[in-house]
Image (spheres, rainbow, N blue to C red):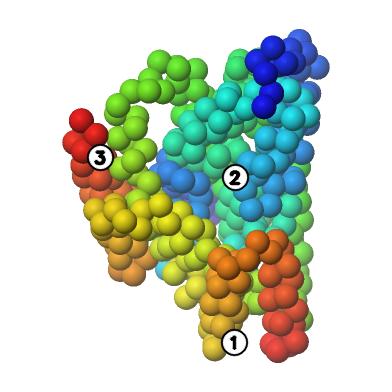
Amino acid sequence: MSDAKDIATPREGVDGLVDLYIAFMQISLSGFGGAINWAHRALVQKRRWMNDEDFAETLSLCQFLPGPNIVNFAMCLGQRQHGLSGSLAALAGVFSVPLLIFILLGFLYSEFGQINFIHGFLSGISAAAAGFIITIGVRLAQPYRRRPLSMLFGLAAFVGVGMLRFPLLEVMLVLAPVSVAIAWWRQS
Amino acid sequence: MNQGSVLLQIAGRFALLSLLSFGGVNVVLPDAHRFVVDTQHWLTDQQFADFFAIAQAAPGPNFLMFALIGWQVAGALGAITATLAIIVPAGTLAFIVGGVWHRFRNAPWRRAMQTGLAPVTIGLVLSSALVLSSAADHDWLTFAITVLTAVIALGTKLNPLWLFAGAGLLGVVTMS
């Protein structure tokens, strides 16, 4: 556990913004299968910008809000250190270099994607990636095995969006308020 | 359609998905598929599945799959537009809420929202799995790869990159 008094003071001014940019670029580039472990290593262990408790709390906020966790994390920590410019520096770190890589990949794909062995390679990987998402869904569902009402809402979302291919907005507008209202009623 | 209106359509739709992505971008893939493959015909099923695969395997966050979609539709400008559309609305919300979070981090409505949204998120992630699998699995072999990957990833702690590499090689050997 890192202690609160161990927290390092972020550098002032432009230096601080550069630090944020570089930290989030590193996290963003190394994060496979969720950048969160890398975020903990970079922000808590290496730079000591946050302690464990702080990290866990910020993470729970970022998971609660819509959007990619790493983007939300960059906005929150950047803001805490340097206000709006800190958020923007951290956010730029998250997407600038990876976006260049992805534009290059998009270019390579449209040039060479139809070459036989590349097409075969991608077909194999995309089938595996679909399987990997099944794994994520099943893992997330584990804690709810014995909660039939929660399962029911999960099932409704799956049938609506996955099987019947209804639009996400409409399905969310129906399911989310009811599910949240029931959760509210059960906890009070 | 001219490029300006295509960019506007990308920006508008992905910005909406950004605000709906409770639990990350994996929950909005079915709707993205619906829009770019079924409605607009900008991508084929296989391209959609390929982009998802590239985003999973390449260095960088998964939401950059939307950059690949944008690239395919409208080049570099499309990639940038799509990326900003998927991160700016949610990021703005995080900026606003992050500043006042300590006031209601223990508020009962927050716990109710979290508890209520979680199962819906799970159903949506599994919807993504279904949509991706029907886009990627066009014969018994690809179907078998999907099932095997899920079983192995659930049963072991193997780094998924190995599974992807194996599946890719299998694809090269059998499909080319």
Q: Quadrant of residue A84?
A: top right
Viewer-side residue, A7 vs B161: A7
Amino acid at the residue labelled 1:
Leu
Q: In the image, which is nearer the foreground, mark 3 or mark 2? A: 3
Viewer-side residue, A108 vs A49: A49
Q: In the image, which is nearer the foreground, mark 1 or mark 3? A: 3
Q: From the top left corner, tell me how far across and down residue A146 is, in percent.
A: 31, 56
Q: Mark 3 and mark 2: span between their CA atoms?
A: 34 Å
Q: Are marks 2 and 1 in contact (CB under 8 Å)?
A: no
- Badge 2 crowding class, 10 Å Cα cut-off, few under 14, some 14 to 19, many 20 or more, is many
Q: For residue B141, which numbered disc appears in the image?
A: 1
**Quarter of the rendering occupied by the N terminus of chain A:** top right
Q: Residue at x 68, y 52 (%)?
A: A32
The chain that hosts pointer 3 is A
Q: Residue at x 58, y 25 (%)?
A: A53
Q: Secondary structure at mark 2?
A: helix
Q: Is residue A30 left or right of residue A60?
A: right
The chain that hosts pointer 2 is B
Q: From the top left corner, tell me how far across and down residue A116 is, in percent.
A: 74, 83
Q: Mark 1 and mark 3: span between their CA atoms?
A: 43 Å
Q: For residue A183, which numbered disc appears in the image?
A: 3
Q: Quadrant of residue B48?
A: bottom right
Residue to which mark 2 is pinned: B83
